Amino acid sequence: MQANGKNQIVANNLAWRFAERIGAKGVEFLVSIVLARILAPELYGTIALVTVFITILQVFVDSGLGNALIQKKNADDTDFSTVFYFNIVFCAVLYIILFFSAPLISMFYEDSSLIPIIRVLGLTIVVSGVKNVQQAYVSRNMLFKKFFFATIIGTIGAAVVGIVLAYWGFGVWALVAQQLFNVTVDTIVLWITVKWRPKASFSLNRLKALYSYGWKLLVSSLIEVVYNEIRQLIIGKMYSSEDLAYYNRAKQFPSFIITNINSSINSVLFPAMSSEQDKRDKVKSMTRNSIKVSTYLIAPVMVGLAACGETIIKTVLTEKWLPCFPYLIVFCITFLFYPIHTANLCAIKAMGRSDLFLKLEVAKKIVGVIALLISMRYGVLAMAYSLLVVSVLSQIINSWPNKKLLDYSYFEQLKDIMSAVLLALVMGFVIYWVPVFGLNDYANLSIQVFLGVIIYYFGSRLFHLESYVFIINLTKEYFHRNKKDKKNDI
């Protein structure tokens, strides 16, 4: 892997996207810890019941058109304006449907208190419809620095609102206000910082053309989201809100890492690949680099999180959240291999094969639904284990087409990540035994983190891991260019 001009452009945008995700999710994560200490677990279960339906409707906000705008080679203002006006009307219709469906949803859960929560939190759908095209414009033009300021301002403001309302005793409404405030301020700041504005133009033919690509991604996303959210719906219906809270809280820890690293790479990689979609070798190189570097960064964190999980829960969340520990281990293993999912699917989308993308999604979800139906009667933990099995099978399904499209097979991909995974497992095995020395939880956690970083860093240097060398060279080139640019400015 050699750093070049294209890699540097991608790296610069990735740095901004990663900083934005780390900053935003970092603040959200810290706030969630504070709120978890103030609020009871069942309140998180209540908000999770509502977000099941809102998350599903959120898929329609994009309608696949955002990705279509990014992927289209010659998208212009007419394309962007057309999608913008369509989204506004469409999101308003979605909210009206949700508003009048609120009583039915509350009847399903046998909880009438959900009605006002659904109607207020559902406003996020309308706000997201306003923001959607701006996001596509930023992604297409690789202006990820814009995301940083919009997201950070919204997240910090929402953090203050959530904590203050929770402290004042507003309960679940603190969580509702936090989410609504975040997306609203995020949208306002993005509109201020991004120059694009909708023009007085609308083309039904352009909309149809974009939708011919985007509808397949819409259906794919809808299948994915419904499949993921149906687990929460089943847990909330068949079991208790506390069980749902423990399940979601355990998922939040590894998901925080994945969202920051993996989704950041995906959001930058897709437009970068789309710009090179006619060059097979370029797309393969980007896919391979993405899988290797993402896994190198994610593997030690996932393994370390699983090894230190019980200590982290007691230290950060208090012992009332300890029942989520078994779920945490399962999710860490599941998320460890997500870079394979993301990079393969990103390459397929970028090459214009949204039809193939949809077929893969259908195949994976057939496997997933079978596993869910088998496991749901045996408890929430069994459902989590079934997700792990499905994740392994999904890796193979996602990577299969790229054996032909990119000449990059699943076994090659496993070979590319094996050194980082093995080093992470060795690190995890060592730090797992730290608590046997009988120190307090804070001391144990500090030693585990420090020792884990040392083992992984020096192991990378000792074995000269390719991803480690690539990151170091890319970082050196970045600072060298910045230093050179400053001298030229002088």
Image (cartoon, rainbow, N blue to C red):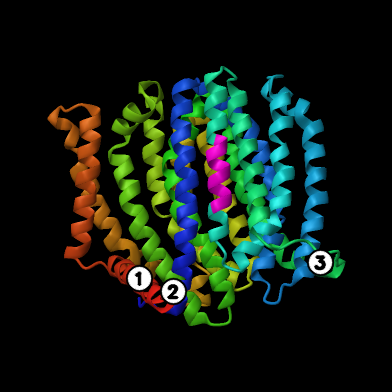
Front residue of this view, candidates 447 and 160: 160
Magenta segment range? 149-158
The rendered magenta stretch, by its main secondary structure, is classed as helix
Residue name at image x 23 percent, y 54 percent: 456
Q: Give the mark nearest the N terminus, 3 or 1.
A: 3
Circles 3 and 1: CB atoms closer than 8 Å: no
Q: How far apart are the two marked residues, 3 and 1, measured between alpha carbons?
A: 41 Å
Q: What element does badge 1 sit on?
A: helix
Looking at the image, the residue that sits furthest to the left is 437
Q: Residues within 10 Å of mark 3 (few under 14, many from 20)?
A: few
Three-letter code, disc 2: Asn
Tags 1 and 2 touching, CB below 8 Å: yes
Q: Nearer the viewer, mark 3 or mark 1?
A: 1
- Secondary element type, mark 2: helix
Cα separation, mark 1 vs mark 2, equals 8 Å
The residue tagged 1 is 474
Tell me the residue that label 3 is attached to.
Answer: 208
Point 48% across, 72% down: residue: 9
Sequence-first tag of 3 and 2: 2
Q: Which residue is mark 2?
A: 7
Residue located at (37% from left, 65% from top): 292
Q: Amino acid at mark 3?
A: Lys
Left or right: 219 as drawn, with respect to 96: left
Report helix, strand or loop for mark 3.
Answer: helix
Residue 433, image x, y percentages: 18, 37
Q: Is residue 90 above or below residue 122?
A: below
Tell whether position 36 is magenta.
no
How crowded pointer 2 is (Cα within 10 Å; few <14, some 14-19, many 20+) is rated as some
Q: Is residue 13 left or right of residue 146?
A: left
Residue 192 lies in quadrant: bottom right
**Residue name at image x 69 percent, y 40 percent:** 124
User: Position of 68 compared to 488: left or right?
Assistant: right
